[in-house]
Image: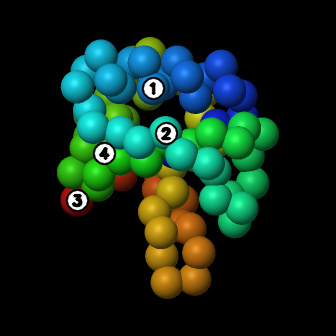
Amino acid sequence: MAFDSTQQALRAEMLLEYAEVEIDLCPTPKEITAGCALSIQFARGSFGKVREIVISESVEIRGIFCRGEEGYDPISLEEESR
C-alpha cells in the first residue's frame, strides 16, 4: 500500500497495528509513483481487514499494489479478498 504523505503512512501503520494486522513498513518500490517514500506491506489474506480500515478510517492512500510478473498491479478497494 503506497501513500502520498508520510503522515498517512504512519497513521495507517498505527491503525493496522492496533487492529493486529501483521504489516511491514518498507520503502516504496521505485516502480510505484507516490509522494511518500514509505509503503506498507501485508499478506494477501489480510486484504479484507486492511480494506475495511482504510475505508472506515478514511485513510488517504495512493493505492494498493500486488507484485506481478511485469511490475506492480493496482488492486481496487472494491475487490473482495481472494
Identity, as a three-letter code, of the amino acid under mark 2: Leu
Look at the numbered disc 2 and give the secondary structure of its residue. strand
Q: CA distance from mark 1 to mark 2?
A: 8 Å
CB within 8 Å, label 3 to label 4: yes
Q: Determine the image quadrant of residue 47.
A: top left
Look at the numbered disc 4 and give the secondary structure of its residue. helix
- The mark lying in front, picked from 1 and 4, is 1
Mark 3 closeness class: few <14, some 14–19, many ≥20 residues within 10 Å: few
> Which residue matches tag 1?
13
Q: CA distance from mark 3 to mark 2?
A: 23 Å
Q: CA distance from mark 1 to mark 3?
A: 22 Å
User: Visible in this render: residue 38?
Assistant: yes
CB within 8 Å, label 1 to label 3: no
Identity, as a three-letter code, of the amino acid under mark 1: Glu
Instruction: Determine whether 25 is above or below 71 in the image.
Output: above
- Name the spot of residue 2 as percent of width and height, x first: 59, 44
> Which residue matches tag 2?
25
Mark 4 closeness class: few <14, some 14–19, many ≥20 residues within 10 Å: some
Identity, as a three-letter code, of the amino acid under mark 4: Phe
Residue 47 marker: 4
Residue shown at the point (68%, 27%) measured from the top left: 6
Q: CA distance from mark 2 to mark 4?
A: 16 Å
Of residues 80 and 63, the one nearer the viewer is 63
- The mark lying in front, picked from 1 and 2, is 2
* Mark 2 or mark 4: whose residue is earlier in sequence: 2
* Mark 1 or mark 2: whose residue is earlier in sequence: 1
